[in-house]
Amino acid sequence: MNSFNTQIWPARGEYLARAAQFLKDGQLVVFPTETVYGLGANALDAAAVAQIFVAKGRPQDNPLICHISQIEQAHAIAHVSPAAQKLADAFWPGPLTMVLPKKEHVPNVVTAGLDTVGVRCPGHEGARQLIELAGCPIAAPSANLSGLPSPTRVAHAISDMNGRVPVILDGGDCLVGLESTVVSLAGPVPELLRPGGITLAMLEGVLGQVKVAQGVLNPLPKGAKAHSPGMLHRHYAPQNAHVTVLCGPDEAVLRRAGQIAAQEENIAFVAMHSLAARWQGQGGVDAGQDEAAYSARLFALLRDLDAAGYAHILCQGTGPDGMGLALMNRLLRSAGFDVEVLG
Ligand code: TXA
Ligand code: MG
């Protein structure tokens, strides 16, 4: 792999044009979006896209999302059905990826050989300007080393990608903090493959019924085929710390966390504001007032607590409604499905 003297620039003004030139030249650029930082390459340049997999250490069987700057650009890479058009009108620009039948010229390295392509028009203005200036769709996974939590702060993008890419654009903290909702419109019924900032209820409001893929809250049974290959891989786990998710009424979660804290050293307890305020022990972390605030902080908290040397991170689980579905989906994966459901 090439080693770079990475430039870190603000995601605005002339720096966007300079970064866009790197993309045009077939190089990689880390850029901010409203969900997480992305690791981008010109989606129509197979050799450039191939470098993404090297820089991330990503398995080749996991397809990439193509980022566009305007809704109309989707037609250049995918077949856009009337249902897809309705979703685009409702939620783009924003944290929604649609899996659509791909057009011929989208390279196989982008789609991992599938006949579909993930398309997203990001809500972050700097991201859209970068794509516009590059003049091509940008293929981009999250800018973490494969397996680690996605970077939602520029410091975390730098920690994973410094030296691996020529340019990192700093756009501050990501507002949503979890990766985009992925919905497939390529099959007979719309299917939610990965929950995110556009909730199931929001999708159903436009599409009517939406099927929820089997792996969204459960580990896939052995031998089952994931419609979204990304669901198969180990994900979002801190480097050293172990994560356990504690689900149930506040009282029960507090009691169980207290028991674990009495038996182990170096534990952190991450909970929403009302519960965190009641924690008497060490290592209490306030994850915010609601699921949206918790989601925005989760990946950054996991990285920071890991770096601070906590060995075991106990995270309060949430219900499956609204943003809770996406939050639980990521919590369960961060924990390798180590979850306790308490009465
Ligand atoms: O918010 C996001 O989506 C971020 C930012 C950078 O836009 N990107 C991101 O990319 O999370 P990545 O590569 O980490 O996750 C893409 C997910 C994977 O689970 C992948 O399997 C799925 O989308 N995916 C992409 N193309 C697909 C396709 N054609 N069919 C099914 N799943 C697809
Ligand atoms: Mg990712």
Image (cartoon, helix red, strand yellow):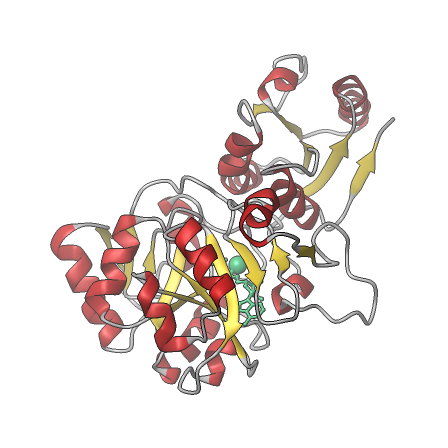
Q: Quadrant of the C terminus?
A: top right
Q: Position of residue 168 (x, y in %)?
A: 30, 57
Name the residue at the bottom extreme. 104
- Asked which quadrant contains residue 75, the reply is bottom left
- Asked which quadrant contains residue 317, the reply is top right
Between 137 and 241, the one nearer to me in the picture: 137
Q: Position of residue 58 (x, y in %)?
A: 54, 70
Between 95 and 21, the one nearer to me in the picture: 95
Q: Position of residue 241 (x, y in %)?
A: 65, 43
Name the residue at the right extreme. 343
Quick check: 300 left or right of 218?
Answer: left
Can residue 242 be spotted in the picture? Answer: yes
Quick check: 257 left or right of 323?
Answer: right
Which residue is at 51% across, 62% downward?
83
Quick check: 176 left or right of 171?
Answer: right
Between 266 and 86, the one nearer to me in the picture: 86
Q: How many marks?
A: 0
61 shown above or below 285: below
Name the residue at the left extreme. 14
Which residue is at 37% across, 40% downward?
173
217 shown above or below 146: above
Quick check: 102 left or right of 168?
Answer: right
Can residue 144 be spotted in the picture? Answer: no
Q: Position of residue 22 (x, y in %)?
A: 23, 70
Q: Quadrant of the N terminus?
A: bottom left
